[in-house]
Image (spheres, coloured by chain):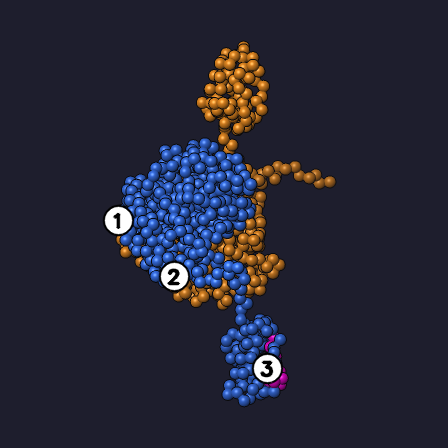
Chain colours: A blue, B orange
Amino acid sequence: MLPEISIDHALEKPIYRQVYEQIRSAILDHGLSRGERMPSTREMAGLIGLNRTTIKNAFDLLESEGLIRSYVGRGTFVEGPEPKLNWGELVSQPANPPAPPNAMVSFSASKPPEDQFPIEEFRATVREVIDSPEAAQILQLGPAGGYGPLRKFILSQMCERGIARDDDQVLITSGAQQAFDLIQRVLASNRETVVIEDPVYPGLRNAFLQGGARVLGAQMNEQGVDAASLDKLLEREHPRLLVLTPNFQNPTGATIPEAARREILDSVRRSGTILVENDLYGSLRYTGSEIPSIKQMDETGDTIQLGSFSKIAFPGLRVGWVIGPRRFIARLTEAKEACDLHSDQLSQAVLLRFAQSGRLAAHREKMIETGRERLRECLDGCSRFLPAGSFYTRPEGGMNVWVRLPQPLDAAELALRAARENVSYLPGKYFSVEKPHTNGLRLSFMGIEPHKILYGLQILGGIFAAEMSRVRRARQSEPQPALV
Amino acid sequence: MLPEISIDHALEKPIYRQVYEQIRSAILDHGLSRGERMPSTREMAGLIGLNRTTIKNAFDLLESEGLIRSYVGRGTFVEGPEPKLNWGELVSQPANPPAPPNAMVSFSASKPPEDQFPIEEFRATVREVIDSPEAAQILQLGPAGGYGPLRKFILSQMCERGIARDDDQVLITSGAQQAFDLIQRVLASNRETVVIEDPVYPGLRNAFLQGGARVLGAQMNEQGVDAASLDKLLEREHPRLLVLTPNFQNPTGATIPEAARREILDSVRRSGTILVENDLYGSLRYTGSEIPSIKQMDETGDTIQLGSFSKIAFPGLRVGWVIGPRRFIARLTEAKEACDLHSDQLSQAVLLRFAQSGRLAAHREKMIETGRERLRECLDGCSRFLPAGSFYTRPEGGMNVWVRLPQPLDAAELALRAARENVSYLPGKYFSVEKPHTNGLRLSFMGIEPHKILYGLQILGGIFAAEMSRVRRARQSEPQPALV
């Protein structure tokens, strides 16, 4: 219904404009809705006590804006605005915390160092691939399971290393992230219970949470997940899935010892849980000796293992893989087909060539040297600059060191201060499953040139120490209870 | 419990071996389970009436195979086999029908022709990309929304063409398949109703079915989806989503006329349904004049449009995109991040360069010529060789012609016969949503050299005609009811 139009003759605004504005606001505020019949100019002039030309002028303006429309012989109807969807209601708000600001020294990203990218080797590899007779095949639609020659290469390598078995098969994924997502869909899409490490890489946690799984955190110690408490958790919950990163876990950098791996294998067998071994960092060991993977130890062949080229070679090329029992991989491949048909073939062919040419192995050697040096700098920086009462892990490989600041420091709050001094890191809450990890933080050292690592830690150490002093002073100045 | 051991002294098989085999089978058939205590060799010898050495020999053999284990002072226990997961129970069987066998003339794949791939232009493009200073950036982790320069390029192109609006944003996906999957997750993950064309591309249907949506089929006619019956369906069901392919739909090849597009737009607005316009084939028009896209017509800006390079350029490089309201794209990008972090950057950079260098436009011209010729051959073949009573669509572009054979022919049955004569096609049931399309079939003409198209259709025509004759003969030889 058209609301009452009130004209103020005292205003400087022309009368027709006052009429126009009031009708317009009635339409836009949805008092008047699309298809509703307007009074005729004559009726309206009579109602308000104005002449017809004034009303006609207002209607013309409304019609020129598409808000009303006159049909000869039928009358005038409300035309617009078009009914719009309410996207705010239709889609939920993004749930992820905002990314930290860019910083001069960024401890925020667990990724290979850009300054060490083997660009020339990459260029040579790509040239070899595009000049090869297989180029045309790479450009055509491929199989959902992955580029055949790459699948074969990975499977045979894994068989040689004693990790894959006769009954195993490989699925190529768009990085490990897609592997988490597909496993969630195939094995945990009915609100099943999934146990993951706490703290854990948020992409892993989010894949299962978004899929509606009931996600529980397993307790970590300096040697990775705690086998004894995990056993109790599995016995109590009989979860569908357990996802572990036994080597240089992200974010803690911790590695599960061989004996604990055997215990975990026994525990999952007893509870009927499917074990997913996320081995993204396994080939980046800087010190100590290699420990057999859980999949290698598992006589039943039931363990699922994830791998990727992203942490050694080029993260921008999205190629990872899943190795597991043939029957499971067949189902996973079907899910992959419904997600994105297949992974990009150019990158698959490039990474295969990179591996087969020996360039990957050579680059890995270089990455190990780089990582060893940067880890050493990072641990040196921690020992020199972190305030007394801090704890930090001493990883033997990978890209991350985990720090626990003395209580009551809040790593998230201090991250804002650090950003103002151009140093960034991710606070513990990013990696939280059940525990808040308020005083925890991750130092990703791999992407930073060595001299900047110490510099960055010196700044962080200063910020943390200053906060500790402030806290201490505040405590001392608190009124003491009277001794009576 | 250990079953009773029975020894047959008449057998040639040594006694210890008979004992070994019976215990082994008890363990492997799970009569005896892991951790169970075995009788001592002495007890067992007494029980069966054998000497202890015989039992000892059997136990040694079992222990060497890891089936039992003796602990000094504690006794002997069943050790294996390891309890195995039952993968058959844990994962469902793949649901997709098996792919048709390879054939000399394959009408089965809706994809660009391999014989026309611009390999040299592709090679030149890749060389330019890897030699550019951006190469290092491409190799590093990228943003979830896609490679920045490509996103910007697509958005500005779409704005110029009047398709995208100020409030729109672009998300790069791993082909259109991933776009279907992400849209399902963000907008239809709670068993919402989704209306799609019937028949439809199975990848589209499967993405929504696997996500648990309630999928309804919209009736098609020669001019694409039927606007009048669609309006009734939307009014009755108020579905969350309507997914349409207005140009050269797969599998029918049909195009929705402009007037019907406007009617559909009105219908979705009235029912509050979100419209997804899948425009994969839009740029492959061979005859007739271009029709504005629904997104272009939609004044509200709410229509979501999907595009891809796969149908014009290289399907093996998985790069598609979604254009839609910024708020929706933000949520879709978050879902994409949980699925695979981001799309492959090398291919994104290569396709951007391919487009910006003008090579994509030149190749598209060539594809249009190729498609025009192949479509003409296909329609010519249909008119010459399909049996009387057949119906087929007359598309103005795209890659597919839809055939309905005269009743009671079964296209799936006849596909097996065709395969024996080295010609393949996909029968209607592959594209079924609600209707069975038993007598329907899809002819994908784009991938076949012209002379083979006529040859293939001649063979198909012969098979169909022979079956029609057989049916007619069978009918005639049926006993007629007596006229009394």
Mark 1, Cα crowd under 10 Å, few <14 / some 14-19 / many 20+, is few
Residue labelled with disc 1: A120
Q: Residue at x 55, y 76 (%)?
A: A25
**Disc 2 residue crowd, few under 14, some 14–19, many 20+, Cα 10 Å:** some
Q: Main secondary structure of the magenta part?
A: helix
Residue at which label 3 appears: A5
Amino acid at pointer 1: Glu
Q: For the residues carrying marks 3 and 2, which lies nearer the camera in this image?
A: 2
Quarter where residue A359 is shown: top left
Quadrant location of the N terminus of chain A in the rendered image: bottom right
**Residue type, numbered disc 3:** Ile
Q: Nearer the viewer, residue A30 or A178?
A: A178
Task: Report the amino acid beneath label 2.
Answer: Arg
- Distance (Cα) linking label 2 and label 1: 39 Å
Residue B63, position as x, y percentages in the image: 47, 23
| Marking on residue A79 | none
Above or below, B168 relative to A295: below
Q: Which mark is residue A417?
A: 2
Which residue is at a point 53% across and 50% down the rendered structure image? A212
Dot 3: element = loop
Q: Nearer the viewer, mark 2 or mark 1?
A: 2
Dot 2 falls on a residue whose secondary structure is helix
The chain letter for the residue carrying disc 1 is A
Instruction: Please check the rendered image and state whether residue A434 is part of the magenta-colored stretch, yes or no.
Output: no
Tag 2 near tag 1, CB within 8 Å: no
Tell which of A366 and A258 is nearer to you.
A258
Could you tell me which residue is drawn at 50 percent across and 77 percent down?
A: A64
The residue at the far bottom in this view is A10
Can residue B225 be seen here? The reply is no
SS assignment at label 1: helix
- Compared to residue A282, the image places residue A25 above or below, namely below
Report crowding for label 3: few under 14, some 14 to 19, many 20 or more residues within 10 A (C-alpha). some
